[in-house]
Image: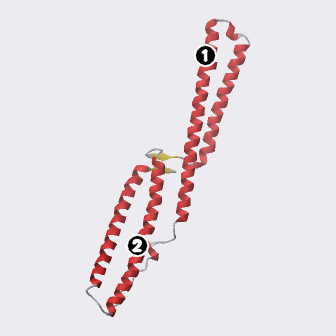
Amino acid sequence: MKVNVGEMSDKLNSINNDLSEFENLYQSIFREVDIARGYWNDDNAEKFSSSMNNEKNQSIKLYQELSSRRDVYQFVKDEYSRSGNVITYDQNRKGDFLYRLGEAKSKINEAQNKLRETYESGLGFYSNFAAGSFQNVLNNVLDYYMRVLDDCYSEVNRYLSDFENIENRTKQKIDELQDYTYENYNPVKIPRP
């Protein structure tokens, strides 16, 4: 999966501009129709006014549907923007990556045990320098790398879990959208005199 937050922001701005223009247009049109209705008073005006009222309701519904889809897009952009501008990851490799970090910890732990065995078997007592070096490696260096790996494991797991959570919440938001498309928009037939 690859998410480009900067590109999403640009597209979202374009969608917001288009929605705003659409809203202004339909409000203008129906405001003019309402004004014209005051000057025209016969059966055709009644039919036209009723038809335009249906058209207005459909326009409002279409605007709301498009806005709800935009809101999902906004949600995805906002959520992923907390993790960076371009995010690339393979959800299927989460277990593999965490397993490899666990393996690295295991190898360091093995190395610590071997050094400890070597030190305790008397090799470390041959010189003060060797004893100090062994103690430093055992108590500081390898512990430091274990903490780094623990931090990496926690961070990677948190990020990947966050991404999974975002994907699940996005799917839920998409599933909640009403099934309404432009093809369902039926233009009103304006009665002819």
Q: Residue at x 37, y 65 (%)?
A: 19
Tag of residue 12 = none
State how far apart marks 2 and 1 are (Cα).
72 Å
Label 1: few (<14), some or many (≥20) within 10 Å? few
Q: Which residue is mark 1?
A: 136
Q: How is the image coloured?
A: secondary structure
- At mark 1, the secondary structure is helix
Residue 163 lies, in percent from the top left, at 54, 49
Q: Is residue 187 visible?
A: no
Q: On the rendered image, what quadrant is the C terminus found in?
A: bottom left
Location of residue 190 (image quadrant): bottom left
Residue 53 lies, in percent from the top left, at 38, 81
Residue 185 lies, in percent from the top left, at 43, 77
Q: Is residue 173 visible?
A: yes
Seen in the picture, residue 192 relative to 164 is either above or below; the reply is below
Q: Residue at x 72, y 14 (%)?
A: 120
Mark 2 or mark 1: name the one nearer the start of the chain.
2
Seen in the picture, residue 145 relative to 28 is either above or below; the reply is above
Residue 20 lies, in percent from the top left, at 34, 64
- At mark 2, the secondary structure is helix
The answer to whether residue 85 is left or right of residue 94 is left
The answer to whether residue 13 is left or right of residue 151 is left
Q: Amino acid at mark 1?
A: Asn
Seen in the picture, residue 154 relative to 181 is either above or below; the reply is above
Q: Which residue is mark 2?
A: 60
5 or 72, which is in the foreground? 72
Seen in the picture, residue 157 relative to 118 is either above or below; the reply is below
Location of residue 122 (image quadrant): top right
Q: Residue at x 39, y 57 (%)?
A: 12
